[in-house]
Image: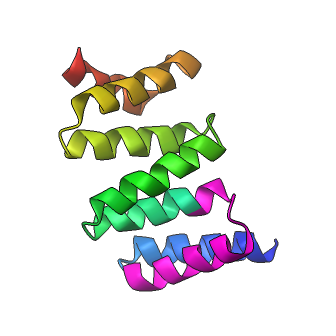
Amino acid sequence: MGQIEERLDRGIGLKNDGLYEEAQGEFKAILEVDIDCAEAHRQLGLVYGFIGLFDEAIEELMVAVRLDEQNLCARNDLALTYSMLGMCDEAKAEFEAVLMVDPTNEIARNNIIYFV
């Protein structure tokens, strides 16, 4: 396992334990080495959402999606963040994008019904 993967794992563990500041540090350190690491952007976006930095969360999740358009987890996370913020058109568009790739995606299927 490489250094980036180790930092990702450590950052996700810290995030899951509610240690958001420490998790941010791990994800930002990864991005200093590899600015195009979609998963680090995704995880940093999730951390920002958990601490109420919603503009930053959306920015990071959008970068993750731009870097890896096939990452359905990032697209669902972005859609769920949009939903939470009442950005219905944006949420619906992201859930639809997920369902175009994976029509059986449970998260998208369970949530798009609120926008139809």
Q: Quadrant of the C terminus?
A: top left
Residue at 59% x, 42% y is 66
Which portion, as a residue range, is magenta? 20-40
Query: Exactly how many numbered labels are in the figure?
Result: 0
Between 22 and 85, the one lying in front of the other is 85
Say how the picture is coloured: rainbow
**Residue ID at (63%, 80%):** 29
Is 105 covered by the magenta stretch? no
Q: Is residue 114 above or below residue 55?
A: above
Along the line of sight, the residue nearer the viewer: 67 or 43: 67
Work out which residue is located at the far right of the displayed protein and give it: 2
User: Which residue appears at 54% of the width and 50% of the height?
Assistant: 63
Overall secondary structure of the magenta section: helix
Q: Describe residue 79's horizontal placement relative to residue 30 as left or right.
A: left
- Queried whether the magenta region covers residue 25, the answer comes back as yes
Residue placed at 48% from the left, 78% from the top?
Answer: 23
Residue 114, placed above or below residue 13: above
Tell me which corner region of the image, top left, top right, bottom left or bottom right, holds residue 27: bottom right
Q: Position of residue 26 (x, y in %)?
A: 57, 80
